[in-house]
């Protein structure tokens, strides 16, 4: 039974002698025990996990040029980057920087047919996976250039962003812009944006036909009215 004063003993430290148990608690050869069971559940402490900030860390690599090992020159502006990040994000950069192309052995690569601002936006997306601008009311020309660059470097996620983001082409579709936007979507294989343009044109054509039909009906009614009184 152990020492009742020993707090390390298991069980209840006060026991009833058998003779006392039989005399006072056994009734017709039976004894009833009333037990209370306490179930404790172990739960892990609540820990608040902050949102991922990897995009901020990678963005710092771009902003402060940590560990850069290759640079791109665009219109005489030199942009140092991390080769491994570009290759992880774009199959085109992977072929260019680690394949059999001449650029794979070059420390500086000169780009043509792209503006520095557009290439900077491409790099921003590659490093942070976010739409690479916080500007409002981007001109269609700027978005067209960015879409062309996204298509060239096989950045399919960025291409899709053009169809949904508020400052992209999706909300800029109008009668004045739909032709150019549809041509751009068709050229760079942006199916959702192309379908948006087609739906817009179909609705506009339907609205025009409805307007013409109502106008013609009113004029025709006046003609009949005049004939009745001649």
Image (tube, grey):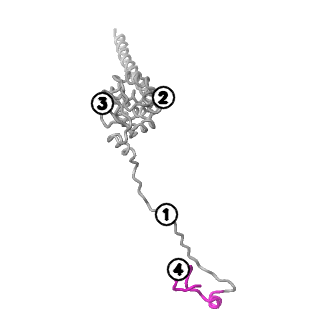
The answer to which of 214 and 10 lies nearer the viewer is 10
Q: CA distance from mark 3 to mark 2?
A: 26 Å
Q: Could you say which quadrant of the image residue 16 lies in?
A: bottom right
Q: Mark 1 highlights which residue?
A: 43
Q: Quadrant of residue 229?
A: top left
Q: Which residue is mark 4?
A: 8
Label 2, label 1: how many angstroms apart (C-alpha)?
Answer: 56 Å
- Does 18 lie within the magenta span? yes
Element class at badge 4: loop
Q: Please state which of residues 38 and 121 is positioned toward the viewer in this rendering.
A: 121
Which element is circle 1 on?
Answer: loop
Labels 4 and 2: the sequence-earlier one: 4
- The C terminus, quarter of image: top left
Q: Judging from the image, what secondary structure is the residue with disc 2 in?
A: loop
Q: Give residue 122's quadrant in the image.
A: top left
Q: Position of residue 160 (x, y in %)?
A: 43, 33
**Mark before the other along the chain sequence, 2 or 1:** 1
- Please, is residue 12 above or below residue 58 in the view? below
Q: How far apart are the two marked residues, 4 and 2, measured between alpha carbons?
A: 73 Å
Q: Which part of the image, by quadrant, shows the N terminus?
A: bottom right
Mark 1, Cα crowd under 10 Å, few <14 / some 14-19 / many 20+, is: few
Q: Residues within 10 Å of mark 2 (few under 14, many from 20)?
A: few
Estimate the spatial distance between the alpha carbons at disc 4 and disc 1, rounded to whole Å: 25 Å
The magenta stretch spans which residues? 1-26
**Against 110, is 30 above or below?**
below
Residue in the foreground of this view, choosing between 64 and 180: 64
Residue that label 3 marks: 77
Q: Which residue is mark 2?
A: 100
Front tag of 4 and 1: 4
Q: Nearer the viewer, mark 4 or mark 3?
A: 3
């Amino acid at each position: 039974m152990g020492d009742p004063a020993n707090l390390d003993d298991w069980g209840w430290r006060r026991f009833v002698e058998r003779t006392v148990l039989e005399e006072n608690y056994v009734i017709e050869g039976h004894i009833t025990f009333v037990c209370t069971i306490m179930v404790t559940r172990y739960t892990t402490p609540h820990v608040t996990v902050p949102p991922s900030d990897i995009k901020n860390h990678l963005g710092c690599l771009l902003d402060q040029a940590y560990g850069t090992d290759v640079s791109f020159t665009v219109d005489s502006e030199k942009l140092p980057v991390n080769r491994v990040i570009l290759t992880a994000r774009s199959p085109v950069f992977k072929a260019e920087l680690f394949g059999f192309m001449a650029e794979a052995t070059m420390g500086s690569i000169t780009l043509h047919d792209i503006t520095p601002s557009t290439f900077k936006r491409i790099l921003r997306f590659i490093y942070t996976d976010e739409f690479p601008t916080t500007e409002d009311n981007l001109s269609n020309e700027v978005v067209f250039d960015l879409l062309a660059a996204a298509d060239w470097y096989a950045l399919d996620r960025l291409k899709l962003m053009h169809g949904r983001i508020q400052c992209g082409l999706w909300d800029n579709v109008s009668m004045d812009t739909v032709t150019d936007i549809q041509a751009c979507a068709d050229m760079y294989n942006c199916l959702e944006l192309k379908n948006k343009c087609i739906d817009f044109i179909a609705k506009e054509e339907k609205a025009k036909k409805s307007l013409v039909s109502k106008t013609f009906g009113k004029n025709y009614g006046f003609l009949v009215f005049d004939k009745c009184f001649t």
